[in-house]
Image (cartoon, grey):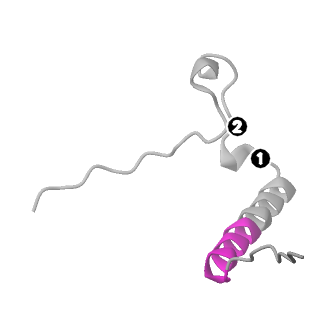
Amino acid sequence: MPRRPAPQQLELFTHPSDVDQVPAPHWQTLPEEARVTLTELMTRLILDHAAGAQAPRRTEARHEA
């Protein structure tokens, strides 16, 4: 079976024209408090998104006279 290439990490917060400027910090160099906060926020974002995908869509109530 052919070997699959290793996945590459996407740069989510850089614009293609900014690549030559200031690079994003490496995860390991961030302070522990920042890593914990970011992990909690990303977890909440993913869970909220998943819950929203399962919830029925709300429609606006219309009262026509």
Most extreme residue toward the front, as rendered?
Answer: 65
Going by the image, does 2 lie left or right of 21?
left
Q: Quadrant of the C terminus?
A: bottom right
Q: Which of the 4 image quarters holds residue 36?
A: bottom right
Relative side of 44 to 6, left or right: right
Percent x, y of residue 19: 59, 22
Residue 25 falls in image quadrant: top right
Residue visible at 68% across and 34% down? 24
Q: Which residue is mark 1?
A: 30
Question: Would you call the spot at circle 1 few (<14 residues within 10 Å), some (14-19), or many (20 or more)?
Answer: few
Residue 26 lies, with reference to residue 51, above or below; the image says above
Disc 1 residue type (three-letter):
Leu
Q: Are marks 2 and 1 in contact (CB under 8 Å)?
A: yes
1 or 60, which is in the foreground?
60
Q: Secondary structure at mark 1?
A: loop
Identify which amino acid the numbered label 2 is placed on: Pro
Task: Please report the bounds of the magenta region as a residue range.
Answer: 43-56
Q: Position of residue 30 (x, y in %)?
A: 77, 47
